Image (cartoon, rainbow, N blue to C red):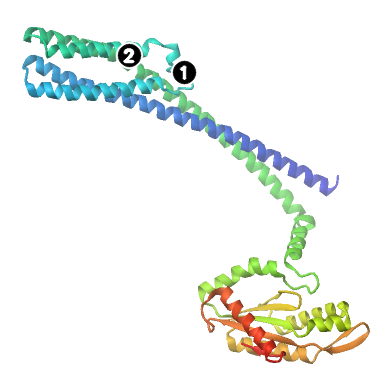
Amino acid sequence: MSFRFKLGILLAIVALASVSSQLVYRNIISTLHASLSSTIDGFETLHAVENFHSSLHMMLTIVSRSAAAPSPADQAEYRSLKKGTVESFRRLISSIEGSKDLDHHLDIRNNPSLVDDIRLHFEEILVETEAVYGAAPSEAATHAAKARTIFDELFEKYLNELHAYHQNRLEALKIEAHRQTERSDLLFYLQLAIILAAAIVAVIFSNQVLLKGFKVAELGAFSDSLTGLHNRKYLAGPVMEKIGEMLSSREPFSLILVDIDHFKRFNDTYGHQAGDAALKEVAQRLRLDLRKSDILIRYGGEEFLAILPGADKTSALITANKVREHLAVTRFEGQGRVTERVTASFGLASFPEDGTVGYAGLFKMADDRLYRAKAEGRNKVVG
């Protein structure tokens, strides 16, 4: 069985495990979301019950006091409390009717008279409390006592039942949450085992295929095929991170733009093969004269960019002139004959001597100075 086939099987297993785990996780999350929603719904109903109980109890307390000793102030307070109690009753009924009890611990369809029975008892309480304020003192006490009796029956028969329903509901949700946690833990350990197995296989075969393949891909992505230097993709990626660090820490560095003089004429005279050979030779000369820590990039057709970390303007000018002088005495061969010498022009900008304008500003300075070097006769460094 070939390595490629084994690797394909491994990747298929990992992919299948990943997809399966995502489906299971989605199911778990959906279940937990439903449980959470159901829990909140249950607490809302219990809160509505408590509010209704409290409001109704306060209203009946005022009614009992009015029955014993009537006063206009108590009657006004009763009217205010009645209004609040009616509102709390509406919220309670709305909460019961809108219940999302997925496990049907409290399902209005299975107990259709629940809401009607609660409403009937509440309406009877209101009838009796209203009668207190329109009856003789002896009859007022009777109406108040009857309202209290209906109140006790309402909570014993119906509202306490709501508490029991929701207690069962919350217990069932706790059990379901525990079951989902166990499923999640099992899935986690299964995924961990698959990842560890994949990691072991990857380590065993990394030197043979994976690591080599990555290095080849990375080299191809960031390298110029003709000169072997870094290309502009490398500048846009890792190099920009390095430049950003140097700017943030105010570490000195310099940019040198190099452009071969009259390269089109060189190509037209000696041919493109000689031009390619000249580009390779220039790249090699730049490599030799720059430090290992310097970054060298083929920026365009015959244009190169050197980034010199830690180099101030003085040292960068010395380096640029050294490269320029070495290039000026180098001859190149093309189509079996020795060609003319190749020279280059240099534009240089340094941080922080040329200001803290960022990479774009420094590059524009170097580019402008490169054009000045060409305008002033070429084979020159302007910095």
Q: Local crowd at mark 2 within 10 Å, few (<14), some, or many (≥20)?
A: some
- 222, 260: nearer the viewer: 260
In the image, residue 239 above or below residue 253: above
Left or right of 149 on screen, residue 249: right
90 to 223, vertically: above or below: above
Frontmost residue, 120 versus 151: 120
What kind of element bears circle 2? helix
Q: Which residue reaches farthest right? A: 336
Could you tell me which residue is drawn at 85 percent across and 47 percent down? 2
**Mark nearer the N terminus (1 vs 2):** 1
Quadrant of res 342 = bottom right
Q: Is residue 281 visible?
A: no
Q: In the drawing, what numbered circle is on residue 104?
A: 1
In the rendered view, does 98 fall on the left or right side of 228? Answer: left
Rendered view: 200 above or below 235: above
Which type of secondary structure does the marked residue at label 1 adopt? loop
Q: Which residue is mark 2?
A: 158
Q: Is residue 108 left or right of residue 153?
A: right
Residue 299 in picture, x, y percent from top left: 71, 74
Q: Residue at x 45, y 24 (%)?
A: 100
Q: Position of residue 178 (x, y in %)?
A: 50, 30
Question: Which of 67/185 is in front?
Answer: 67
Quarter of the rendering occupied by the C terminus:
bottom right
Disc 2 residue type (three-letter): Tyr
